[in-house]
Image (cartoon, rainbow, N blue to C red):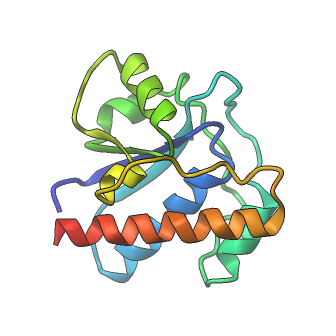
Amino acid sequence: MNFSNLLIVCSVSTARSKMAEGFFRDFFIRNGMDVSVSSGGIASNARDGMLISLDAKLVMKEIGIILSDNAVSIDLKKRPELINKADLILTLTEKHKKEVLKYNNSSDNKVQTLREFAGESGDIEDPSMKGVEGFRKSRDEINRCIFKGLKRFE
């Protein structure tokens, strides 16, 4: 694996990016890998300190991954050091990717969507307002893309 500091980016960092962060942390811990994982939001309505979606916590707990009760959102516009120190940035949508590249003022190849990481194209839909089933669908799609992408690094 050619990265040691991973950043996952979505809109406000209360659901999709936190689920992806949970999957990556679990994988790296179980495999004894020293990879730092963080997540944040890049949208104009991203804020520091928002609570993580209860539905995101619930659907992750269903599969044995606990999202910390202390986990809160991070506004990447206020924390540019997280973008700068990451050697791989995975976004949940193409729009997030464009915003990170614009904000970071680069065309750096360290930024890709989660689907690109998996060798695909497209976005991971926002599960907000779609109930628990919408969160399960997003969780399963995030999980599938992560593990497909990780296999490409083997």
Q: Give the answer, above or below, for where 149 lies relative to 44.
A: below
Q: Give the answer, above or below, for where 138 lies relative to 30.
A: above
The x, y position of residue 117, in whole percent, is 31, 54
The x, y position of residue 16, in whole percent, is 60, 53
The quadrant of the rendering that contains the N terminus is bottom left
Q: Depth check: give the residue in front, 8 or 128.
A: 128
Q: Residue furthest front?
A: 121
Residue 109 falls in which quadrant of the image?
A: top left
Q: Is residue 93 left or right of residue 146?
A: right
Q: Depth check: give the residue in front, 125 or 139.
A: 125
- Residue at image location 71% in from the left, 64% down from the top: 135
The quadrant of the rendering that contains the C terminus is bottom left
The x, y position of residue 148, in whole percent, is 33, 70
Q: Depth check: give the residue in front, 21 or 16.
A: 16
The x, y position of residue 128, in whole percent, is 77, 50
- Residue at image location 31% in from the left, 36% down from the top: 85
